[in-house]
Amino acid sequence: MYFSERMAALAKSHGQHPALIDQDVPTTFAQLHAQAQQLAGNFSKLGIGPKDRVAVWLPNCLAWLQTFLACAHLGATVLAVNTRFRSQEVADIVGRGKADWLLMWPDFKGIAFADILADVPTEVLSRLHAIITLGDTQGAATQAIAARGYKVLGYNALLDTPSVAPPAAGNTGVLCFTTSGTTSLPKFVLHDQATLIKHGEVMQQAYGYDSSSRILASAPFCGAFGFATLTGGLVTGCTTVSEPVSDTHSTLAQIRKHRVTHTYANNESILKLFETAQSPADFESCKLFGFASFSPAINSLLEQAERNHVELTGLYGSSELQALVAAQPTKANEGDLSVRYLAGGRLIHPEARVRTSDPETGQILKQGESGEIEIFSPSRMVGYLDQPEATAKAITADGYFKTGDLGYAVSERQFVFQTRMGDSMRLSGFLVNPAEIEQAVEKLPGIQACQVVGGTLGTKILPVAFVILRDGAKADPAGWTQECKRLMAGYKVPVRFEVVTVFPSVESANAVKIQKNKLREMADALLAAHA
């Protein structure tokens, strides 16, 4: 099973049905398949083929989907790049991800893509065969990139030039998400085509899609959450609605205009939709909203959902298992409704199973006992790209993925998520490893050591950096903030730098361990004091 095969079938069976509505412009399944095939033909003429890696640095748009399908046809792997990433993160994906091509939109949303790219070390970009740009090839940003000596190609010419695609490569590793784990650098999670398609098919059954379904994708396609939302519609003949930039008001407008039936977002975003809506009539077309608990202290979501007559379910997923892999049941015959509004869910794949294990001994625990959540699912990744040892550590001998999450099993398919076992932070919907931020901060002038934790302010989790200065150095929070903004996505930049002389710690039998829990308490107090 592979994407070209599925899209060719849908072009026949659903040819005139909209596959994607991007910025209010519909593209049918027949049009999308033809566009992807022509693009694949021209990509092939450039030399893009099996085993090539294409870094796609685009927001949600038709071109993202066209490019993904063209790469899937050719057997190339898409390295999904978040548009909020900055030089340090882009350099990591292009360099460590061994990208052969980079596709970007230099003039999108006023982001200084050309300046960000200029900040990426030359030796990293030198491995690229070319940079492919959307938009005006004569625009200032594109010309600035070309002026630095990089080969620049126009996307529109590749899309519009008549060409015949070579035979499809079949099922291949096609998509990499970046994720944070227990290592100091993000891992690249590789999924193959058959697994992505099967997950989309099962989503259709689990979430009740039919020929009239219109699924709003507001989360970025570059992440597991947004991509699962996209594929659940794409591979089943449903319509996905999207736009490159969205906020609460535009999302409400999309729901009303396009008669959206399903959408999935973090709990804070959905609460804002309910609070901003003029009346329950704004949601009269909606059949199901799914929410991921990314923000703490959300207490009125269920009440608002009932007031607006929208059925609501909690979601669970990960880059390794794909998003929306579990949802809490909405009917008694589907599972235990007493935990319906807790994080976690019932695994949507009939063959999937969940269990918990003792984090220290590995012993499998009884249902109801808290431990590390382990999940067996057909939606599981192929592995971590170029990291066989990390892959082996993450998967048990009998095929369960060790999630790194703490929780308990309700049944063999239903579970409750309690917290991350490690210290990862959920910032603006993205799971971030503090070590990634700490390494960047420790390179700043005057800083000897750094510890980053997520502090809670209202419904948000915000990064707070505790730093120890070098001898004779002076604190420079404004300068540190400015430099971090140059290196990292905005949501990773610490909102506060607090200078300390030592980090709170405790001695264990094996080592001296920094007490992140105490740092989090300090961060909460600091944020509250300066709110």
Image (tube, grey):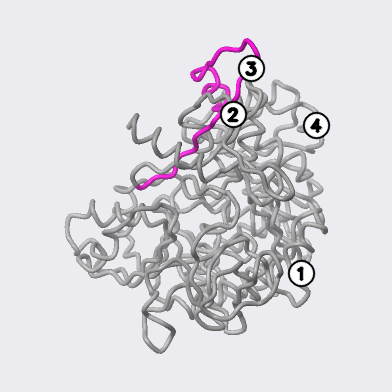
> Label 2 near label 3: C-beta < 8 Å?
no
Residue 59 in the magenta stretch? The answer is no
Q: In the rendered view, does 162 fall on the left or right side of 343?
A: right
Q: Which amino acid does label 3 sit on?
A: Pro
Is 169 rendered above or below residue 461?
A: below
- Provide the residue designation for mark 3: 445
Dot 3: few (<14), some (14–19), or many (≥20) neighbours within 10 Å?
Answer: some
> Label 4 near label 2: C-beta < 8 Å?
no
Q: Residue at horizontal 47%, vertical 78%?
A: 206
- Could you tell me which quadrant the C terminus lies in? top left
Q: In which quarter of the image is residue 462?
A: top left
Tell me where the magenta segment starts and ends, as one range: 459-485
Residue 170: mark: 1
Is 218 rendered above or below residue 206?
A: above
Q: What residue type is labelled 4?
A: Ser
Q: Earlier in the sequence, mark 3 or mark 2?
A: 3
Q: Which amino acid does label 2 sit on?
A: Val
Q: Nearer the viewer, residue 337 or 46?
A: 337
Q: Distance between the residues labelled 3 and 4?
A: 29 Å
Q: Distance between the residues labelled 3 and 1?
A: 51 Å
- Provide the residue designation for mark 2: 502
Q: Residue at horizontal 53%, vertical 47%?
A: 425
Q: Earlier in the sequence, mark 1 or mark 4?
A: 4
Q: Which amino acid does label 1 sit on?
A: Gly
- Provide the residue designation for mark 4: 126
